[in-house]
Image: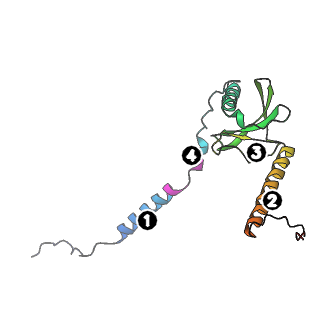
């Protein structure tokens, strides 16, 4: 029994390697979670596609010409001029504005930065690709007509609710 025996092996392994491993894993996850602004800044931005010199403009004009030809019956003219806004799928709004002039059966379109007239709020189909305009005077005339119609309907309703008397209320008793 004089042989040397190996040192006794502890039944419980050391926890130091597991804490080191856990720290390493957490550190690696933290580094991966950091924003990569430096990486993105180092990469050159993709060059924009070579834009043609002027083909985009005729396409827009041809688009408004075709759309207006299909929807021109809703236009409100003032001295052979009106304004419309075309729906733009890129901006998802009526952002392409045009002044339209007519000479006989021919329409001429001019791009404008924004509409200068009130947008037509009556008599237009809901899913129209165009917003039509009217002048302030035309808008006021329409509002006056609506007001008169509302007043007439109100007076008819009052008249019917009080028994539908056929004699006017003039104070004349009929004696």
Q: Are the residues tagged 2 and 4 within 8 Å (C-beta)?
A: no
Task: Between residue 38 and residue 16, name the one nearer to us.
Answer: 38
Tell me the SS state at disc 1: helix
Mark 2 Cα shell of 10 Å, populated few (<14), some (14-19), many (≥20):
few
- Name the mark nearer the viewer: 2 or 4: 2
x and y percent of residue 142 in the render?
A: 81, 48
Q: Residues within 10 Å of mark 4 (few under 14, many from 20)?
A: few
Instruction: Kindly report which numbered mark, 4 or 3, lies closer to the viewer in this rendering.
Output: 3
Residue occupied by mark 4:
39
- Give coordinates of residue 41: x percent, y percent: 61, 44
* Mark closest to the chain's N terminus, 4 or 1: 1
Badge 1, how many Cα within 10 Å: few under 14, some, many 20+?
few
What is the C-alpha distance between the residues marked 3 and 2?
A: 23 Å
**Which quarter shows the N terminus?**
bottom left
Q: Which range of residues does the magenta coloring cover?
A: 31-39
- Disc on res. 151: 2
Say above or below: 60 vs 26. above
Label 2: which secondary element: helix
How far is disc 4 from disc 1 in space, using C-alphas? 25 Å
Give me the C-alpha separation between circle 2 and circle 4. 70 Å
Q: Are marks 4 and 3 in contact (CB under 8 Å)?
A: no
Q: Is residue 34 magenta?
A: yes
Q: Measure the C-alpha gap from mark 1 to mark 2.
A: 81 Å
């Amino acid at each position: 029994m004089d042989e040397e025996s190996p040192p006794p092996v502890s039944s419980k392994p050391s926890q130091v390697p597991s804490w080191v491993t856990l720290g390493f894993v957490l550190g690696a996850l933290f580094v991966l979670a950091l924003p990569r602004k430096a990486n993105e800044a180092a990469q050159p931005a993709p060059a924009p596609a070579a834009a043609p010199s002027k083909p985009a403009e005729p396409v827009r004009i041809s688009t408004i010409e075709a759309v207006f030809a299909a929807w021109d019956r809703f236009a409100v003219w003032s001295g052979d001029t009106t304004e419309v806004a075309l729906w733009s799928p890129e901006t998802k709004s009526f952002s392409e504005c045009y002044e339209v002039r007519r000479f006989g059966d021919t329409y001429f379109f001019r791009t404008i930065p924004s509409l200068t007239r009130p947008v037509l709020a009556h008599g237009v189909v809901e899913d129209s690709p165009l917003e039509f305009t009217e002048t302030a005077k035309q808008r006021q005339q329409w509002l006056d007509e609506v007001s008169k119609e509302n007043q007439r309907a109100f007076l008819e309703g009052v008249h019917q609710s009080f028994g539908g008397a056929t004699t006017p209320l003039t104070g004349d008793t009929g004696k």
